[in-house]
Amino acid sequence: MSTDSATSIRAFLAASRQQQTNFLAELVRVPSDNPPGDCAPHAARTAALLEALGLAVERHPVPAERVHAHGMVSVTDLVVRHRFGDGPVIALNAHGDVVPPGEGWTQDPYGAAIVDGWMVGRGAAVSKCDFATYAWALLALKSLTVTLAGTVELHLTYDEESGGELGPAWLLSERITQPDFVISAGFSYAVVNAHNGCLHLEVEVRGRSAHAARPFTGVDALAAATHILAALYRWRDGLAARVSAIPGIGAAQLTIGLIEGGINTNVVPDRVVFRLDRRMIPEENPAAVEAELRAVIAEAARAVANTGLAVRRILLAEPLRPVAGSAVLTAALCRHASAVMGETIVPSGVPLYTDARHYAARGIPTALYGAGPHTIEEANAHRADERLPLSDLAKATEVVALTLADLLGATGRA
């Protein structure tokens, strides 16, 4: 890529910075909480805003029965394609569904207030911001007067918070897209090429109800569940030794996140249900992880007489691992990110899971990079007062635009 092209990209982005900020604010102001997952209205607003920028938007509604089977209300995925010429197809993927706001906000979670240079609002950092990052990176390329070889696609999807099966996985399975490279939503100071996998299991323990005056006539499901939980917590201690060799990942984890059951205070509980989250490091085999965990639960349950047990898988998200061709993508991102962000950035992993895994599972080189501060804690991701430094939005957009220009082989004047 020529110096002139890089200068032109920077000038275009600087001139349209306020427009980009306003675009993001409009996205934050439209709720898209998942659950409940009624996200089609947000997609409609996003499509209208993108079309106002001169981009052609494809609307891909996911069939209602499939949406409802995944516990959501409505999903419309958006695809923008711009072909510059013959060459690779590079997709930029971000999700517009967000976790509900929760308590403790000092600003309106849908207000998009700007406080000391940070935009505050649910989705400002995860990951409505990258709708703006990727749209303006594409617009910057369109503004160039050079020959580019390839196609840029925006994949704006709406079920990352519930697994991504209705977003990237659906777009790929329906052959709506077949990209050669993918950049997926991330933060500005890390180029991520690996992340954890995740297993969610629901465990149901069944007993028999009885009056609290004669509890011995029943079977206490909560007592049985407590025994199983204690076994899981003891077993969890051993996970500290299962540490990934990939920087940034850390050790495998287990969390019991939900528990419910019982009938009334004066009744022996006949049913208790809890859900667990098992984070897998990339080196682990998901099938083996699930089998091991089910065995721990079953062994603990056998020690409690007269109880029933049912274990149901809720989610199995594969880890993200580098695939053939990933190094080309991560090298370009790291080179430009290091220059723009002012610090050395190398490929690393993160201890969470994302939609990026759906692309990598099909052998597509994939990396995470987008707008955000150094850590999810700084961004208050999934917490009250989620926020994004607008300076990082500008810088990340520049990095993505420069990377795209490199990969699409910007040469000469058209």
Image (cartoon, grey):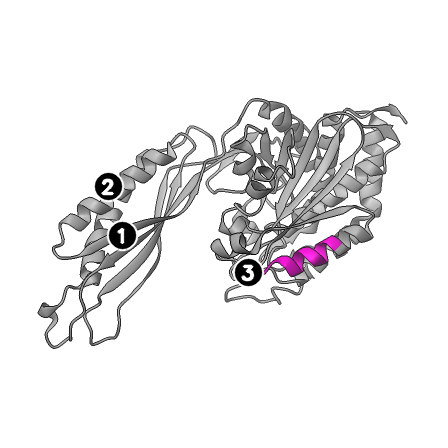
Q: Secondary structure at mark 1?
A: strand
In the image, is 219 to the left or to the right of 106? Answer: left
Q: Nearer the viewer, residue 12 or 115?
A: 12
Q: Nearer the viewer, mark 1 or mark 2?
A: 1
Tell me what residue is drawn at x 30 percent, y 59 percent: 273
Q: How many marks?
A: 3
- Whether the magenta-drawn stretch holds residue 108 is answered as no
On residue 295, the disc is 2
Q: Residues within 10 Å of mark 1 (few under 14, many from 20)?
A: few
Of the image marks 3 and 2, the number of the one nearer the N terminus: 3
Residue position marked by numbered label 1 in the rendering:
310
Q: Residues within 10 Å of mark 2 (few under 14, many from 20)?
A: few
Quarter residue 336 falls in: top right
Of the image marks 1 and 2, the number of the one nearer the N terminus: 2
Q: Are marks 3 and 1 in contact (CB under 8 Å)?
A: no
Up the image or down, 3 lies above or below 203; here it is above
Residue flagged by tag 1: what amino acid is it?
Ala
**Residue 218 place in picture, x, y as percent:** 13, 67
Q: Point out the image quarter for the N terminus.
A: top right
Tell me what residue is drawn at x 76 percent, y 51 percent: 50
What is the magenta range? 37-47
In the image, is 402 to the left or to the right of 184? Answer: right
Residue flagged by tag 3: what amino acid is it?
Val
Tell me what residue is drawn at x 66 percent, y 61 percent: 41
* C-alpha gap between disc 3 and disc 2: 35 Å
Q: Point out the image quarter for the C terminus.
A: top right
Q: Secondary structure at mark 2?
A: helix
Residue position marked by numbered label 3 in the rendering:
73
Of the image marks 3 and 1, the number of the one nearer the N terminus: 3
Whether residue 157 is visible to the viewer of this picture, yes or no, is yes
**Residue 388 place in picture, x, y as percent:** 64, 52
Quarter residue 118 falls in: bottom right
